Image (spheres, helix red, strand yellow):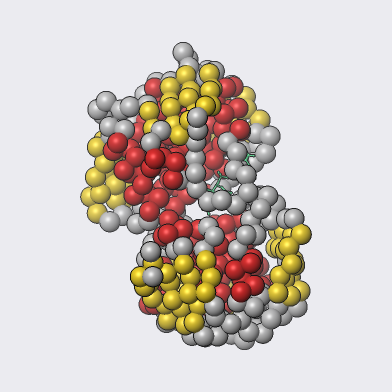
């Protein structure tokens, strides 16, 4: 087991280079199995979830090879099994994209139900509803989802609620259905657009990704493609929040500033000096920031995946701040850990009320999930003394070289065996 040990109170100064987007990578890698050819996917983050999905594809018969640390070559021209119900698959939620990919190409799939972070219920009913509407027979038993379809036929699908995963999964299956599928009330996240762009490079015919209506004209075959995935807006936001919390002058590079608009606006409102360039944002923070109210929403609203990190920042701002979590029904499990550091937060259902304190005090805390772990790092950079974070396997699932990137800008952080 490993833990991160942080000595707080150091200002952060310098540049952070952002990796490829985890939530694009975990959709695009399964999508590669739809190609009757070879895909080269570049700018992948070097994180656990990517390694796990690459290993899963290999076990299914694809030939996967890392041509370098951030590039994966996937050859799906051989015999691919439509069965993916082994242990590794259960470990990450994004394995569910194998359902849409296999159903699209082979008209059948057998995939273990997803695991992943444990904040609240995380159903996949909207995914399965979409597959049924396309003509698939759907069975769920013993923790495995089985799909079978004589034919997939394009249709109109109205999403009961905005869902990133269901939008992408239905887009995968529909890209090889007969006829046209219209997804309404679709998710608009950058990784939805990135997956559509990759599929179109493979020969799919998808229009409207990034809006709430996506039109997919099914094609018979998809061929190989070379693709570079987008930068990770959540990793970038995490470092912007860390700079605001610790104080200093940090530039996050290799980003798409437009993707950061909701956070950029909020940090500016709190007193952080923000300067945008073509592919970077500079964050200058000194002294105590003003509190603020946050409501998480689907893109382009404030991302739920930055909610824990922002709550950590607000715990040290002046005044009272209110955070409303509108996407997940129980994403405050990390608050108990922040309280160990001295944060004053009360939670009622989806609403957290934060009374800002002048100082936090280092303590032993746990990462309860991926973004909660990131919130502990943000808080530890500010807290007086030493903060130890265990369960950091969660953090490694979504952040490439977090201690190296933070050390380079002046943080006192190290990974130790425990
Ligand atoms: C994706 O999860 C991300 N994960 C999550 O990021 C992110 O929090 C979420 O989108 C929202 O942006 C990946 O992309 C791998 P949803 P996903 O379907 O697709 C409900 C991270 O930290 N819902 O948009 O699972 C659901 O319960 C992770 O990187 C249903 O009810 O999220 C939630 O309340 C954490 N039925 C809401 O919709 C369904 O079939 C949004 O979920 C699907 C979802």
What residue appears at the point 49 percent right and 44 percent down from the top-left corner?
A: 115
Find residue 337 and report its horizontal and vertical position in percent: 59, 68
Asked if 23 appears above or below 383 in the picture, the reply is: above
What residue appears at the point 56 percent right and 51 percent down from the top-left corner?
A: 118
What residue appears at the point 73 percent right and 55 percent down from the top-left corner?
A: 350
Q: How many marks?
A: 0
Tell me: 82 left or right of 133: left
Find residue 68 and report its horizontal and vertical position in percent: 24, 54
Q: Is residue 270 visible?
A: no
Asked if 70 appears above or below 408 in the picture, the reply is: above
Tell me: 391 left or right of 312: left
Q: Quadrant of the C terminus?
A: bottom left
Find residue 260 and report its horizontal and vertical position in percent: 56, 61
What residue appears at the point 74 percent right and 67 percent down from the top-left corner?
A: 346
Tell me: 244 left or right of 53: right
Find residue 173 and report its horizontal and vertical position in percent: 48, 28
Image region (quadrant) for ligand 1: top right
Q: Nearer the viewer, residue 136 or 286?
A: 136
Q: Quadrant of the N terminus?
A: bottom left
Q: Nearer the viewer, residue 146 or 262?
A: 146
Q: Is residue 220 visible?
A: yes
The single residue placed furthest to the top in the displayed view is 150
Q: Nearer the viewer, residue 221 or 66?
A: 66
């Amino acid at each position: 087991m490993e833990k991160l040990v942080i000595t707080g109170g150091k200002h952060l100064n310098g540049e952070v280079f952002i990796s490829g987007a985890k939530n694009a990578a975990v959709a695009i890698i399964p999508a590669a199995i739809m190609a009757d050819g070879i895909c080269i996917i570049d700018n992948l983050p070097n994180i656990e979830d990517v390694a796990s999905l690459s290993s899963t594809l290999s076990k299914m018969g694809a030939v996967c090879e890392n041509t370098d640390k951030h590039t994966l070559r996937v050859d799906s021209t051989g015999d691919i099994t439509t069965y993916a119900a082994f242990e590794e698959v259960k470990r990450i939620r994004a394995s569910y994209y194998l359902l849409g990919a296999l159903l699209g190409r082979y008209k059948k799939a057998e995939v273990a139900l997803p695991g992943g972070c444990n904040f609240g219920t995380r159903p996949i009913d909207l995914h399965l509803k979409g597959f049924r509407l396309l003509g698939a027979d759907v069975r769920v038993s013993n923790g495995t989802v089985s799909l079978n379809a004589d034919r997939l036929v394009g249709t109109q699908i109205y999403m009961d609620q905005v869902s990133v995963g269901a939008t992408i999964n239905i887009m995968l299956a529909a890209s090889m259905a007969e006829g046209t599928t219209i997804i309404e009330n679709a998710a608009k996240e950058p990784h939805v657009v990135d997956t559509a762009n990759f599929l179109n490079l493979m020969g799919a015919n998808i229009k409207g990704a990034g809006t709430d209506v996506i039109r997919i004209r099914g094609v018979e075959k998809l061929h190989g493609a070379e693709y570079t995935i987008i930068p990770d807006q959540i990793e970038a936001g995490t470092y912007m929040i860390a700079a605001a919390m610790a104080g200093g002058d940090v530039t996050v590079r290799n980003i798409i500033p437009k993707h950061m608009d909701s956070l950029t606006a909020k940090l500016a409102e709190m007193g952080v000096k923000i300067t945008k360039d073509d592919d970077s944002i500079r964050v200058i923070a000194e002294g105590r920031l003003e509190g603020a109210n946050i409501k998480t929403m689907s893109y382009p609203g404030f991302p739920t995946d930055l909610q824990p990190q922002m709550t950590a920042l607000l715990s040290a701002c002046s005044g009272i701040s209110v955070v409303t979590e509108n996407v997940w029904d129980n994403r405050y499990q990390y608050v108990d850990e922040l309280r160990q550091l001295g944060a004053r937060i009360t939670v009622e259902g989806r609403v957290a009320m934060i009374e800002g304190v002048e100082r936090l005090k280092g303590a032993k805390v746990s990462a309860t999930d991926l973004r909660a772990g990131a919130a502990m790092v943000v808080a530890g950079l500010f807290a007086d003394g030493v903060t130890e974070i265990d369960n950091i396997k969660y953090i490694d699932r979504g952040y490439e070289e977090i201690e190296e990137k933070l050390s380079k800008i002046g943080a006192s952080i190290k990974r130790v065996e425990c």
